[in-house]
Amino acid sequence: MANEDANVLPKSYPMVGADGPLSYTKNSQIQRGVVDGANELVSEAISEKLDMKILQFGTSNDFRIADFGCSVGPNTFIAMENIIDAVEKKLNNAEHQPSAVEFQVFFNDHSNNDFNTLFRTLPPSRKYFAAGVPGSFHGRLFPKSFLHISHSSSALHWLSKVPEEIVNRKSPAWNKGNIQCTGFVKEVVEAYFGQFKIDMESFLNARAEELVPGGLLIILRSTLPNGVHFSNTFKGKLYDLLGSCLNDMAKMGLISEEKVDSFNFPIYYPSPEEFEAVIQRNGKFTIEKTSLFIIPMKDIAVSIQFGVSQVRAVYEGVIQQHFGNELADQVFNYFNTKFEENIFTILEEKCDNRVELFMVLKRKCLA
Amino acid sequence: MANEDANVLPKSYPMVGADGPLSYTKNSQIQRGVVDGANELVSEAISEKLDMKILQFGTSNDFRIADFGCSVGPNTFIAMENIIDAVEKKLNNAEHQPSAVEFQVFFNDHSNNDFNTLFRTLPPSRKYFAAGVPGSFHGRLFPKSFLHISHSSSALHWLSKVPEEIVNRKSPAWNKGNIQCTGFVKEVVEAYFGQFKIDMESFLNARAEELVPGGLLIILRSTLPNGVHFSNTFKGKLYDLLGSCLNDMAKMGLISEEKVDSFNFPIYYPSPEEFEAVIQRNGKFTIEKTSLFIIPMKDIAVSIQFGVSQVRAVYEGVIQQHFGNELADQVFNYFNTKFEENIFTILEEKCDNRVELFMVLKRKCLA
């Protein structure tokens, strides 16, 4: 039942904790854009697709929501409040209003997530009972038929691990010189895609067990339009630049080449079609809604510092675990310099868009 | 609903976090003694007093347990496992065995408790789904009728605050020169006892709402036999010694006298009768079992270092919040010295016993 042992699988890489200048709390404006961009969609979906009869599956009148891969606030707080507002509106409009529904929100992330900061920054005037649930969302985290709405935003690109072939010198999928699934090498894409399918199957199976029949699974995740290679997106170019920093540092003798060769990001961005296909194959959910949208970035002042901080807040943990804590500073300082030197080249090249996928799934009723 | 705002009441004082040499994790052998001493009693009580019909109040076949004031491990893990073992035994012996009961354990403590360490040290092979619930146990933390068993060990002596009269120079209950309810001054005892009654009423009301009808509330807490003054117990003498350290340091000009005068421990040890009386007055529980026991200390090697560490692991937070972080080291170093000088005097004096009270309450069924 306990699916996480610090020494075994699955590996986990927390966002930068606390709320200092390098923290995820202070450097998650893009992820905030996803939440903001989807607020309307989430409200609409709950209004149209949530059947309040699912409350019969509660102890009494409690309504339970979980956020999978919540990291630290404030994005998760905003998303959860938005869901509660939508459910409340629905309750107020119901013909037979259940009396005094109480909300309970479960914040999930790996056990090395900074839950202390999450708990200390909970909105004081929240209208829900809060709980933290440590563990990998690739496995079970709740009892059967426990949750009414499950939610995951900007988290499902994380795989449970880097596929083994990727770092195996003898495999045709060896990703020498790269730190991610660029999209250009067929064998590499296949290996990442294989891991993606395994992980999504585990994720969907776990969520299906935990949701009450008729419960909703709301997903926000980045996807790549068919035919778009990740390394042709702005984010992909940024990560490739980070990869080239590591390669440079290996050449300068600051890191061993072998260490760099064995390093890859455990992330994969599927196409919307690929993601839909795993859901269909899994068979435990109906797809109720699908929308694509581009993150509204217009209110975000993009600077070199901003770009580096956003990447660091998310990937410092991965870098530290592989290369050691001391090296992280060096890597990101060098990344900062190289980013400055290359920013105009990157901006001049045409960038393809990643696309945010919003999806509402409904747990099928058991036969 | 959210009852805890860092800037407002109730104040909270976490045990020393992480798992270093000064941590609560490494310095809670006495509290462990309480858990071990009560294991048999808990198992027996569950066997005799738990009516498995309460499972009808679950979503499906999940059984929910909460530990109030859990601090960090390992004591809370041991206590929770013991409860689950007893419930499982009961299930196995049941005539109509419910299929595949799943356990969920909620670890509660203040939001400045070290939940990160708690989560990272969860037993990897646990047979329950784990969650952390931040907030004061003097208020509501769960939806109505949500829990099947609530548990609290070595935590209920904490009051939500120091009663105001205690630090008011103009009050007859002003506790000048002391840092705790010694038991010798009638007005001081009355003020502490008043706060105790208010806090226990809030605690019992909250737990009554959260438990399913028929659910059990298992309490382990230190009490003082009628007529025993806290300052005549070994622990009381230790705290008085700590208080005299603060007074000495004020005389030496290291701390302001006013700062010392305004400092008191927010703790109260009632007599078993006092505690029983608040439960009776509250009226929401029946008392199913009561036992008194003395902590088996024979396996614990008591040394100066041990004594100081045990006190520090629990009270460093209180000292830090009042006097500032820097002073805590100084206070406890001085305490160490003074303890060494006085240990034989303390041991030669007759010490009265505190007594551990074990109580099993059952949530009355609603009329």
Image: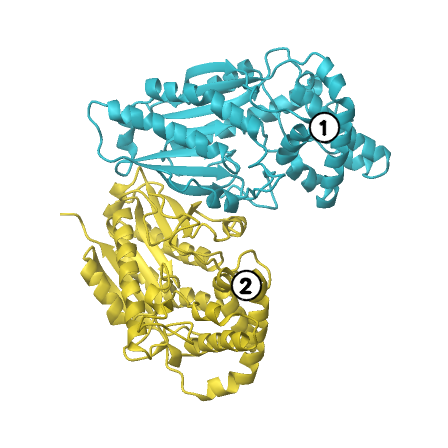
Chain colours: A yellow, B cyan
Q: Secondary structure at mark 2?
A: loop
Total numbered badges shown on the rendered structure: 2
Q: Whole-percent x and y of residue B242? A: 73, 29
Q: Is residue B47 above or below residue A61?
A: above
- Which quadrant of the structure image shows residue A334? bottom right
Quadrant location, the N terminus of chain A: top left
Q: Mark on residue B179?
A: 1
Q: Is residue B100 above or below residue A157?
A: above
Q: Is residue B299 above or below residue A76?
A: above
Q: Whole-percent x and y of residue A270? A: 30, 70
Left or right: residue A224 compared with residue B132: left
Query: Do the residues indicated by labels 2 and 1 lie within the same chain of the protein?
Result: no
Q: Secondary structure at mark 1?
A: loop
Q: Which of the pair B261/B99 is nearer the observer?
A: B99
Amino acid type shown at disc 2: Lys
Amino acid type shown at disc 1: Ile
Q: Which of the pair A263/A234 is nearer the observer?
A: A263
Left or right: residue B20 compared with residue A282: right
Q: Whole-percent x and y of residue A245? A: 52, 76
Give the chain letter at badge 1. Answer: B
Please report contact status of discs 2 and 1: CB closer than 8 Å, yes or no. no
Left or right: residue A78 compared with residue B193: left
**Residue B214 visible here:** no
Which residue is labeled 2 in the image? Answer: A26
| Gap in angstroms between the C-alphas marked 2 and 1 | 41 Å
